[in-house]
Structure formats: C-alpha cells, structure tokens
Amino acid sequence: MTERIPFNWPHMTGKELYYIAESHFNGRLAGDGPFTRRCHQWIEARAGCSKALLTHSCTAALEMAALLMDIQPGDEIIMPSYTFVSTANAFVLRGGVPVFVDIRADTLNLDESLIEAAITPRTRGIAVVHYAGVACEMDAVMDIAKRHGLVVVEDAAQGVMASYKGRALGSLGHLGTYSFHETKNVISGEGGALLVNDPALAERAEVIREKGTNRSRFFRGEVDKYTWQEVGSSFLPGELVAAFLWAQLEEAERITQMRLDAWNRYHGLLEPLESSRQLRRPTVPAGCRHNAHMYYVLIQPEIDRQKVLDALKLAGISAVFHYVPLHSSPAGRRYGRTHGALDVTDRQSECLVRLPLWVGLSPEKQELVVQVLADAISAQS
Ligand SMILES: *Cc1c(COP(=O)(O)O)cnc(C)c1O
C-alpha cells in the first residue's frame, strides 16, 4: 500500500500559535488590533497599494469591491466564466450582471482581445482573475478600462507574491483582492484582503468594512463620534486570525520559494510528455513572475479525464479538475450572460488536471505522481 499523497497540505510556519497567544495575553481580540496593522503594512509595502484591509475572505473583499463601485441592478461586469463563483456572486448580490467572455488558451486568463466587443452602455467594470498566480495582460486591460471609463477589479485570490512587469498582482487595477484560505499559498484558514489602489476609494473602503460607519476615523481621533455613513457590513476579521496570518506573511518569501521549487520540479519531469504531445504544461508569459500557486496539465480532449483521475486515486494520489465554467452553471445562466462563444473555456476546463502541490511534497512523491499520470495517459493512447 503506497502512502497517500493529498492534493493540498497546509504549511504552518511554527509561529502561528505563538502570535495567537500574544493576542490572548494582551487581551486584543477584536479586529484592527496590532497584528491586523502589521498585516496591512506588510501588504501595503509589498504591493505598493494605497490601502490594504484584511477581510474575512477574498469573497468578502470582492463584495466590498462591488459596494465601492456602487453597482446598481443591471450594471454589467465583464469577467471570465472560468473562475470561482465568488468573482460573479459579489456583483450579483448587488443586482449586477456578469458578462462572461472567453479565456486565452495559453494562460487560461480572460482574453483581453475580446473585452472591448463585450462593452455596452451598461458596462461598469472588468473583473480579471489571475489564474494560478499567472498575471492577466494588465497593460491591455487597463488601457481598455481607461478609454471606456471602467473600474478594474483584480481577483488576485491566487496571486499573493506574484507580479506583472515587476508590480504585485492586486496592485494593478483600481481594486485588488487576496485570499488566505487554507488552500492558497499564504493562509489563515479563512481570510482575505482588499487592496485599494485608487486613493479616492480608500476612505469609503474603511467605512464599508466597519458596518458603514466612520469608526476607523474615530479611533484615529479624526472625528469626535462615529456615525452611520453609508451601506456597509462587518468585513473585518478578529485579531486571532490576523495573528495567525502574520506568522505566515513573515515567511511568505520562503513559502513561495519552496512552492516554486516543487513547481519547477514538476515542470522538468513533465517536459518529455509535452514533447511527445501527450499533454500541455502551464504557460508563464514573459514579464509574469508567478507564485507556484498551482501545477496543472492539460491533457488531450480524446483522453478520458475521469479515468486518469481514477488511476491517480487508485495509486493514492489526490489530483483534481477545476472550475465548472460559470456560464454553464444554473446560477450563472440565471444571473449572467455570455458574450461570444466560450469555446476555449469549454474545451480547456474539460482537459485540466491539477496535481498535488504543497510545501514539503518530496521529489520522490512528485516522481511518482508524474509516473502514474504518464502511465494513465499511455494506457488510453
Ligand atoms: C479561492 C478563490 C476565491 C475565494 O477565496 P476565499 O478567500 O475562499 O473567499 C475567489 N476567487 C478565486 C479566483 C479563488 O481562487
């Protein structure tokens, strides 16, 4: 019986409980305490955004983005269909309409050449998703947005520590969102952040996050009482979560490097299979520095993916497919619409297999994964 290889295994740095104990000892449990501030400063310094705000999740940060954009019923947001539900849900909650556009065959990111044709008088924004921590073509996206007066939200849930032309993902659009969910690179169980890059939105972001009040300004001594200013909610995590996250952010560089080592090992091991056209490896365009969030392969459409996953499972290896495209889901059909054919989305989403990737995954285990994958593909060729 071979040892089981899980798809993901959360990496702990060792200091998480130490920092949580510090919060416990100091009696600081509510949000926006010393650990939250440290996390904010780290993100602001690292990403170069005007303001970083921790949230309960990337989902919550996306919901804040929709509130900040003041999305009204019928407003349209252009986005990929090949993404997590939260990208769309956040806008649908405000009555917005996701307009799904096809992705690029190489990076599986929103195809920037298709955005402009999808713009209507109701279009308010573009939500880009940096799949697997590989950047979208942001120069082109920002140029389109500028010419049409649109807001760009980067769903950089998978993009912490990755960059585009030297600039951090999440810092390129008007707003960016991070996830610190257990399955991401830098984690706090559930957790996220909103990155406000447009300084004009910074103050309102604080208000929306604090139940629609100017409580943050009150605590800074800028106003003598705090009151209800606009629609908001409670989007801030408590200090225990921030304390955990701080232990992770301190080690973010090392975590990323260890993941990159494993990613590069897969990339080398799988090169022969790409050369013999049995599968395609991920593409990282020039100018993009990824963060090894994910290693996926695209198998040939003739190969039965379920059989490949079953063969891996039989060998104790947990490999998985990814998004069911939103335009083909019940809620996606009800609340959104497509613009143009989504052929690449439909084709690639059926061929994608994600391999186990986590800090501590041994070279031997990676070799086994590649061996079993290769055999499973050959058995069908
Ligand atoms: C993980 C993920 C989310 C959701 O993040 P949470 O922190 O779990 O809310 C949103 N979008 C993308 C692209 C993701 O990968």
Image (tube, helix red, strand yellow):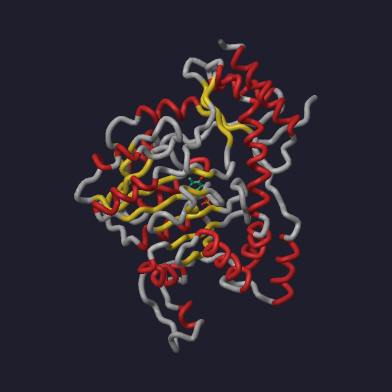
Measured as percent of width and height from the top left, residue 119 is found at: 24, 45
Question: Residue at image x 24%, y 52%?
Answer: 147
Q: How many marks?
A: 0
Image x and y of residue 63, in percent: 42, 57
Q: Quadrant of the N terminus?
A: top right
Residue displayed at 46% across by 48% down: 165
Residue plotted at (55% across, 17% down): 278
Residue 50: name its quadrant.
bottom left
> Would residue 2 appear left or right of 264 to someone viewing this image?
right
Image position of 34 with respect to 355: above or below: below
Residue sitting at 42 percent across and 30 percent down?
Answer: 105
The image quadrant where one finds the C terminus is top right
Considering every residue shown, the one lying at the far bottom of the view is 224
Q: Nearer the viewer, residue 295 or 64?
A: 295
- Near-viewer residue (229 or 275): 275
Whole-percent x, y for residue 86 in the image: 45, 48
- Where residue 100 appears, as percent x and y from the top left, is 33, 40
Query: Residue 33 versus residue 262: which sits nearer the camera?
Result: 262
Q: Is residue 270 above or below residue 22?
A: above
Please, which residue is most extreme toward the left here? 121
